[in-house]
Amino acid sequence: MTTGEVTSGTVLWEPAADARENTRIGRYLAWLEQERGLSFADYPALWEWSVTDLPGFWQSIWDYFGVVAHDQPTAVLGESAMPGATWFPGATLNYAENVLRMPGRADDEAVVLAYSQSREPVRLTARQLRDQVRRVRAGLKARGVGKGDRVAAYAPNIPETYVLMLATASLGAIFSSCAPEFGARSVIDRWSQIEPKVLVATDGYRYGNKDIDRGPEISAIRAAIPSIEHVVTIGYLDAGGGDWHELDGDEPLTFEPVPFDHPLYVLYSSGTTGLPKPIVHGHGGILLEHLKALALHHDLGPDDRFFWFTTTGWMMWNYLASGPAVGAAIVLFDGNPGWPDLGALWDLADTAGITYFGTSAPFLMACRKAGLKPGKRLKGVGSTGAPLPPEGYAWVYEAVGTDLQLLSLSGGTDVCTGFVGGAPLLPVRAGVIACRMLGARVEAFDGAGKPVLGELGELVITAPMPSMPVGFWNDPDGTRFREAYFDVFPGVWRHGDWITIGEDGSCVITGRSDATLNRGGVRLGTAEFYSVVESLPEVADSLVVHLDKPDDPNGELLLFVVLTEGAELDDALRGRIARELRAALSPRHVPDVAYQVRALPRTLSGKKLEVPVKRILTGTPVDRAAATGALANPDSLHAFADLARERG
């Protein structure tokens, strides 16, 4: 089978016959039977219980993983309505204390392995990590940081950032990070909302073989945010510079007991339009969700080295950061994943002894397009950030390894996890997400707000999850929070994705519902469209938008393509694109016009931005259509503004 021939739904991997004995989810099932008298024949039965008996399920996660608490809860779910569900009332705990337990990992075992294009590798044992957190915690405390204060990191995915997050959490203070590739304006838009007391920043960073100085940005951020009382710099480009080493002290490592929903960190929506939403996540909700997801879905434990390519500006960094809570060591990487070539991260798998390799769907598709055959012995490969098409699944099994579990994860910054993903007890099928994750009551709603199976609907969550946000920062009456998730279906979380849920619980996500192509009343997802267009060797990237036309119920479908070097969008290529779309999808998918552009707008975490392009093409000025500081390539928007003028 070649990767071009696989059809959606083809089985590519099946669990071993002894999966129930040799996986963490299997051992959890045995524990449920022994300790709770509950037996489940298969994953769908377990999932059904997990979303029906919410107190029973989440109490089992608390007990099974032995959550360290200072005060025990008086209940599991105090109030169950959404928004406003209250989890584990009365409990006090600390996220950092639970992460730094590192179950199953000896004091002298490596727990953080960091690689970078700017410095030599760093290896921290469990003992060294705890000691660094202890010292940085004392340094923060000496600078007046206490419960509820905010600490901001303008720093890459390096050990210092990780230590700082855990030290901040240990004090009951609140952490927030921006990757150093964010421009000053973008950082100020985020942090002026939460008013940090301390800023920790790197002097710059290296991307591939290019050094990028961040001195001017740090000055601009400090000048614009008067709440910042202390700036600590990490000498990263200048290895001997900075005063990070002064963030130090000699006090015992203790952990501030905080309520279950006490703020742990603030993440931000991509901020492609308007100010980014400051999403507040709580200690307890994040801890329980990540224990469940990392151990039971990704099957991670003390034998694993867990890697996900991410920056500190993407929620996958926070997801990776919880690895030690389930006993896994984490592998950090800072730099350009495509330098000197796309094989660099696959080489890192050998260097660092990675057992679980997480990345984005666009990265996997780029490796496929480049013809890579890395051939690795991995337990698992994780994919997120965009839907992975069937040929992406096939490439992983053909080129990376045949006996790994590929888990395509989809969720969001809003919950700092996946709603849908995979499980070690379920087969992997091309182009299909294996399941709805435990404790996540995911449904597809039609336009009337009724659940549907086997047809396209809005992805909604109809029961609360502990890692739903505590709220938005500075939104005292919850208005912004309700508008973001609950304004369409009262009491139900609407996520903004199109999903088809099969009778067996498997899922296919076909793109953002706010970027829907609606032709003559038929809704078309963007993911399948890109899968077809980008399978052509001449097409490096593509973006499609649908514009309404008052005199035409079909509207107008516009396709934008970035071509490989030397290729040209001539009539022959236009014809081939049209034929492929017509044959693979339908005549409705054939664009009315195709344009060649030099680049497409993407967020810093790699997501395509259909909605800002649509806004620009319908007359919105560039600076109002998108927050350019949140984009990897803001200049790409000007071509669309020029086109909007030409089209009149």
Image (tube, grey):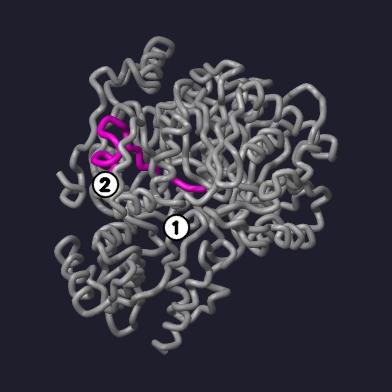
Say which amino acid is labelled 1: Lys
Residue at horizontal 26 percent and vertical 26 percent from the top = 15
Whether residue 501 is visible, yes or no, is no
Screen quadrant of the N terminus: top left
Screen quadrant of the C terminus: bottom left
Give the side of residue 351 with respect to residue 628, left or right. left
SS assignment at label 2: loop
Q: Position of residue 176 (x, y in %)?
A: 66, 46
Residue at horizontal 70 percent and vertical 30 percent from the top = 133
Q: Nearer the viewer, residue 113 or 218?
A: 113
Q: Position of residue 275 (x, y in %)?
A: 61, 62
Q: Residues within 10 Å of mark 2 (few under 14, many from 20)?
A: many
Which residues, given as a range, are shown in magenta?
A: 395-414
Residue at horizontal 31 percent and vertical 47 percent from the top = 372
**Is residue 400 inside the magenta stretch?**
yes
- Are the residues flagged by discs 2 and 1 in contact, CB closer than 8 Å? no
Point out which mark residue 337 bears: none
The tag earlier along the polypeptide, 2 or 1, is 2
Give the side of residue 263 with respect to residue 443, left or right. right
The answer to which quarter of the image holds residue 106 is top right
Give the side of residue 540 with respect to residue 418, left or right. left
Is 259 located above or below residue 360 in the figure? above
Whether residue 106 is visible, yes or no, is yes
Residue where numbered disc 2 is placed:
431
The answer to which quarter of the image holds residue 513 is bottom left
Is 521 located above or below residue 226 in the figure? below
Q: Residue furthest top?
A: 34
Say which amino acid is labelled 2: Gly
Residue where numbered disc 1 is placed:
607
